[in-house]
Image: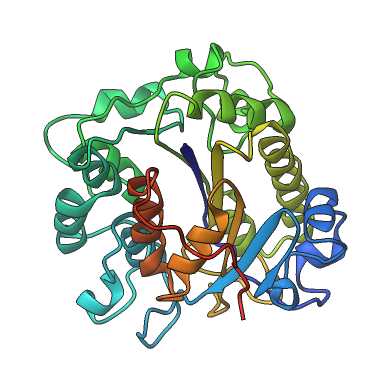
Amino acid sequence: MSVIFIFIDGLGLGSQEESNPFFVNDTPFFTEILEGSHLSSEAAEREYRQVSLLGLDATLGVDGLPQSATGQTTLFTGINAAKIMGRHLRAFPNRRLRKILSEKGMFLQLQKRSLNGTFVNSYRPEFFASLSSEVKRSFSCSTLINYYAGLQFRTLDDLKTGNAINMDITNESLREKGFDVPLVSPEEAGKRLVHISRGYDLTLYEYFMTDIAGHSGDPAMAAEVVKKLDKFLGSVVENINPERELLLVTSDHGNIEDMSVRVHTINPVPALIIGKDRCKLVNFLKAKRDISGVFPAVLKVLAERKPVQVLPDDCSIG
């Protein structure tokens, strides 16, 4: 069994209101898989034929708006970073969070259990020029967990051969900067992600245009991001083998789901689960109901590929 872990920055579960681009725009994939519902708080805490949708707390018991550095550190380690810090930290991880990532990063934890993982995002040439033994303060949490695990970073050459996915899915941002890379449809990118994942126990992909769109306050930009994401995820689901593969889509905090504000929200974030052992993953996630439980739950599912006991085939969310 393999797990595809899609991290979508700044995606909460908003209400079915005009400020929620997942409600006001056509999203054929979400509408179909949620059996007529939109991706929203009203659709959460329900079990569907193909998918389970949970709402997870991103505040982590700490006052204030959830932020990226503490939220992502929590997601990628299973450690409640906001609680350790006593506050939510925005943008990039500081020294204290980098220490947590260096000791408890997702890929390191996989390696200790003889499991292999990969980060499929591509990196531009200037990143490699700056990469050295000294960790930069501008490195993201996803970059750091890959770095601390000693894993290779995927290049634009990998992107050209279909062995990487760019952070914007389609490569448009790279082409606008003058890089000679092909334009890729969201559907093709989803297909490539599934193909890459079949060589690993866990494959991580990060999409953060949602957070950028949320901060922009631009409904047109948000609509474009939502439609692209809908097509991409629809392709991933179309191409996975639900008898052998598990897809988890989640986030670090809310943002894009409420375009009436240009800051993060305290809305719960989705845990969208499809495929093999989804009932088991739902049952594990029920134990915490916040984002600190996400990676420990994934790790349990991977570790129990040959379970010594069978959990009841009941993933009712209530």
Percent from the top left, x then y, of residue 301?
41, 52
Percent from the top left, x then y, of residue 76?
34, 54
Left or right of 217? Residue 22 is: right
Give the quarter of the image for residue 146.
Answer: top left
Res. 7 visible in picture? yes
Left or right of 18? Residue 127 is: left
Give the quarter of the image for residue 87.
Answer: bottom left
Along the viewing direction, whichever of 282 and 143 lies nearer the viewer = 282
Percent from the top left, x then y, of residue 227?
78, 47
Q: How is the image coloured?
A: rainbow
Along the viewing direction, whichever of 267 and 134 lies nearer the viewer = 267
Task: Please tell me whether residue 27 is drawn above or below residue 177 in the rendered image.
Answer: below
Q: Residue furthest front?
A: 309
Res. 263 visible in picture? no
What's the residue at 28%, 41% (across, down)? 107
What's the residue at 58%, 78% (across, down)? 267
What's the residue at 40%, 76% (across, down)? 288
Task: Please tell me whether residue 121 is drawn above or below residue 296 in the rendered image.
Answer: above
Task: Please tell me whether residue 221 is drawn above or below residue 264 in the rendered image.
Answer: above
Give the quarter of the image for residue 154.
Answer: top left
Percent from the top left, x then y, of residue 313?
58, 62
Left or right of 316? Residue 219 is: right
Give the number of marks.
0
Task: Please tell me whether residue 46 is drawn above or below residue 279 in the rendered image.
Answer: below
Q: Residue furthest bottom?
A: 63
What's the residue at 23%, 35% (across, down)? 114
Quadrant, the C terminus: bottom right
